[in-house]
Amino acid sequence: MADHVTTVRGTMYRSATEAVHGEVELLLHASVNSLTGTLQVIVDRITRDCNSIALAKKSHQNAESLPAHELRLRKQIRKMVEDADRPIMQALKREQKGKRFRKSSGAQKKETKEET
């Protein structure tokens, strides 16, 4: 009977572990897809802005406002990259919190087993 209980517990643990791995995998795929889309938007904007800068340099129009325009572009690019990193960093923080929680709950279970 004890072997059956151990087998059931092991099966439940494996099922829970597989479910967590599946959720993490889905989260990573969603993050990668989101990041890919965001990066494509950033690349498109940079390409468009670089083309406009190249046209301005060629025609020598707005020569005085060009450095300010370049500074604005750099600032926009920096902000877009930070915005793109934010969901990934939040997911990593949630995963780390989950690991800490699982470790602490495992320690509590071990203590209760020793008391009995």
Image (spheres, helix red, strand yellow):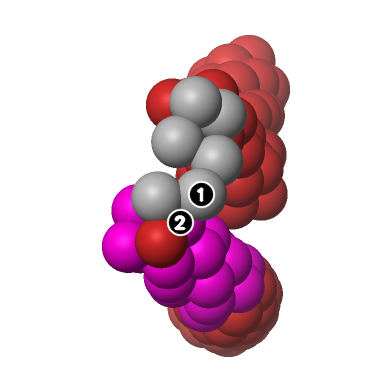
Q: How many residues crowd mark 1 within 10 Å: few (<14), some (14–19), many (20+)?
A: few
Write down the residue under mark 2.
56
> Quadrant location of residue 5?
bottom right
Tell me if I can see residue 28 in this picture. Answer: no
**Label of residue 61 in the image:** 1
Task: Tell me if 109 is positioned left or right of 44 in this view.
Answer: right
How far apart are the two marked residues, 1 and 2, measured between alpha carbons? 5 Å
Which residue is more in the foreground, 60 or 1? 60
Q: How many residues crowd mark 2 within 10 Å: few (<14), some (14–19), many (20+)?
A: some
Identify whether 79 is placed above or below 3: above
Tell me if I can see residue 19 in this picture. Answer: yes
Residue 16: horizontal and vertical position, in percent? 64, 72
Labels 1, 2: front one: 1
| Residue type, label 1 | Gln
Quadrant housing the N terminus: bottom right
| Label pair 1/2, CB-CB below 8 angstroms | yes
Residue at 55 percent of width and 41 percent of height: 62
Quadrant housing the C terminus: top right
| Residue type, label 2 | Ala
Which residue is more in the foreground, 20 or 58? 58
As for residue 54 lying within the magenta part, the answer is yes
Task: Tell me if 51 is positioned left or right of 12 in this view.
Answer: left
Q: Secondary structure at mark 1?
A: loop
Identify whether 22 is placed above or below 89: below
Residue 90: horizontal and vertical position, in percent? 65, 39
Q: Earlier in the sequence, mark 1 or mark 2?
A: 2
Please report the bounds of the magenta region as a residue range. Answer: 38-58
Total numbered labels placed on residues in the image: 2
Task: Tell me if 88 is positioned left or right of 12 in this view.
Answer: left
As for residue 48 lying within the magenta part, the answer is yes
Residue 50: horizontal and vertical position, in percent? 41, 62
